[in-house]
Image (cartoon, coloured by chain):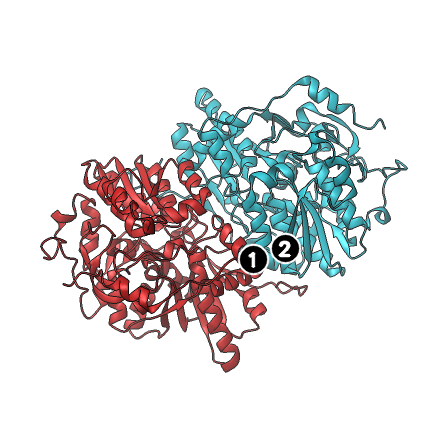
Chain colours: A cyan, B red
Amino acid sequence: MADMDDTVRRHKYELSEDEMPTRWYNIVADLPTPPPPPLHPGTHEPVGPADLAPLFPMALIEQEVTTERYVDIPGGVLDVYRQWRPSPLFRAHRLEQALGTPARIYYKYEGLSPAGSHKPNTAVPQAYYNAAEGVKKLTTETGAGQWGTALAFAAALFGLECEVWQVGASYDAKPYRKLMMEAFGGVVHRSPSELTEAGRLLGADPANWSGSLGIAISEAVEVAAGDPETRYALGSVLNHVLLHQTIIGEEALLQMAKAEDTPTLIVGCTGGGSNFAGLSFPFLREKLAGKISPRILAAEPASCPSLTQGVYAYDFGDTAGMTPLMKMHTLGHDFVPDPIHAGGLRYHGMAPLISHVYEEGYMEAEAVPQTECFAAAIKFARTEGIVPAPEPTHALALAIREAERAKETGEETVILTALCGHGHFDLAAYDAYLTGQMTDEAVSAERFAAALETVPQI
Amino acid sequence: MADMDDTVRRHKYELSEDEMPTRWYNIVADLPTPPPPPLHPGTHEPVGPADLAPLFPMALIEQEVTTERYVDIPGGVLDVYRQWRPSPLFRAHRLEQALGTPARIYYKYEGLSPAGSHKPNTAVPQAYYNAAEGVKKLTTETGAGQWGTALAFAAALFGLECEVWQVGASYDAKPYRKLMMEAFGGVVHRSPSELTEAGRLLGADPANWSGSLGIAISEAVEVAAGDPETRYALGSVLNHVLLHQTIIGEEALLQMAKAEDTPTLIVGCTGGGSNFAGLSFPFLREKLAGKISPRILAAEPASCPSLTQGVYAYDFGDTAGMTPLMKMHTLGHDFVPDPIHAGGLRYHGMAPLISHVYEEGYMEAEAVPQTECFAAAIKFARTEGIVPAPEPTHALALAIREAERAKETGEETVILTALCGHGHFDLAAYDAYLTGQMTDEAVSAERFAAALETVPQI
């Protein structure tokens, strides 16, 4: 609610282009133990650069394994970032007022980017480094479509072709996302598709018809691996992707300082984990250094709770088992989550780096059912004026739980959340919620247990 | 195109919240002759405040007729504006590069607002003043849906109900727009509807089935006029609406000064005219004062060219003839334009204030066919990363024509255009264009001539 009161408050904590951080942050440098390495799917030996070269350009492989604390952002990437970065940090005055909470709520908003989410933060450097090494085409998967849109945009900028396998459930529910990718020049396929061996094989089982990120990854990887001028780009999970997203948290640190405030809770949604890591890792650096002490909380969907219900084990990143084995929290690589509206969170695993940080006890996780998320989203939209993507509504729901707790306890609470994208392409989900047709996920311990049986025994 | 070159350029000319202008500008104060007054539809006498009171709150009626040069923006409105304002002014480096033009192209981007367009600039003060005078509900029309979304958002902030009649063609083509209005709490009807006398009467003619802004206005006005706690809100055309939009141009003046550059051409699209006036009137003030000398150019759709093909005469603002008569450029109040994709430009008339400025020779106009607009839009999207709404693509098309002319002549050309909204809800139009299914408007002199016969003889 606004009101007739004529007080003018500060809503944004902005940075100028010149204040934008010029390096990415690598949490590995500050962790007491290194994360376990990925293993070759055949030999179970740690993978080396040569194993990854058919899929990624060398610059990204180097970033994947670097132990340097900071990586300089190239000028060509900074130049593109500067169109929409630094992104704003907002104080949610009107949401606080509507909740009647003493908590102060801040949100770092990535929805003003070309793709409408945080995804261009990594799409742009990935396209840049691929173009620099002479690659002609990028393939990728996309869930909600945010990542595919970001990569199509970035590819257009650097003169690369871009071919996207979109998870079937999202492809069907969000036709505008496909059109957005096409407007940027991308080519989009419904996954599972008939175009790849993995797609034909997995698509033969009707249980896979709604698709999953794991299946779409198999398809995109297969095409990239088969063509020397094509590389594969992943929108989350890998170290270099998380690295690129730390620009979010680096900016947010500067902005919280401008707000002269310190978060007591940092909450972000987790699918593959890049948005969450992007916001929280720079704050975790400060926490490890003893400068601040926020709780760091991952909000995961009840339908796909890899941190709270999965096991920490080596598993494949994709469903067909073509990727290296990664030590991560996983629900099993052939787990197909319910087709919830937050398509971007329907991933069976969790970024190895987040999994490691979680195991080390530096963060917490909580699963949220989707109707609570959409109730939070509607409250947010009608006060803050932004219709959020379904993914970050998971974090909003936990932020609101915390703000309501602060109302009861009177504790000084400062919440910082990652609003990683807008929901302009997700309005069918809002329609389902507002017309009472949305139900919570059917979640059963038996189902998770059955899926976990597919995790390789290593 | 970006490139591998690592030069970091300045892309945005931003203002801080504290630099945001705090008053709106009224061009009437600086025009040598006053614009002709609106007339009562029955008596043909100039309308007074009492005639307008059933439709608008007194504060807006005062703004409608004021001759003061500046109007202070209330604190409660500034507080909401500050969430997304000042809006950025971008330099289109990558578009310039792709065109190979020496012209410098700037765009003032309003798509980062809650509704995704410039419309909240007036929706917020309209809701504010209505709430201050005790109004409970607002009714309105919407074409593309941008205005309805903005009003639904603003109404939610100030605790007002909001009921929207959406032009049939847009309602059918853009289901997500309706859902966005509903997410903000608005109630949306397809126009012509069965809910009003005007809707039933006009809807009986199949020629009206795709609807028009004129018909939707009749419906919204009828409902507001019949309920003492309800008022009507118009998203364009009227003086107070144009006044509120001048925040765009006031900011752009400060931003062009930061860029140390001066436009030689200012181009904006015109439907009712509020976006165009919002950007250009503050620059026109400077032009009238002899400080700058840009050409000021309105880009109108070939299907609805009120400035270039209409007559300057008294006509109704709506199709049923319920509004006051306004002296304006009109194609006749029952003209129903082709259902082009730029739904926001399908209005038979032009803001009386713009019409007057045009008659006085201070600006020019040009009509553009829609395939040229979408060709420009795709060029823009693939370089600047923003998929524009169909409406501002008309201005982009003329900006690109000018940039290409500069390439031939070598003249120093500085273009400033109003990118008034994003096209996230208009992707079906992009699909039609990219798949070759879009055709140019069928325009015939006979059709315009026939429509002009409905203009009242006063």
User: Does residue B220 appear anywhere in the picture?
Assistant: no
- At label 2, the amino acid type is Ala
Q: Is mark 1 on a helix, strand or loop?
A: helix
For the point 68% across and 28% down, the residue is A306
Residue that label 1 marks: B434
User: Measured from the top left, where is residue B83 in percent x and y?
Assistant: 41, 45
Disc assigned to residue B342: none
Residue B354, placed above or below residue A292: below
User: Residue under mark 2: which chain is it in?
Assistant: A
User: Measured from the top left, where is residue B389 in percent x and y?
Assistant: 46, 55
Disc assigned to residue A154: 2
For the point 49% across and 73% down, the residue is B403
CA–CA distance in space, label 2 to label 1 = 19 Å
For the point 36% across and 67% down, the residue is B444
Q: Nearer the viewer, residue A415 or B317?
A: B317
Q: Which of marks 2 and 1 is in front?
A: 1
Identify the image quadrant of residue A281: top right
Q: Is mark 2 on a helix, strand or loop?
A: helix
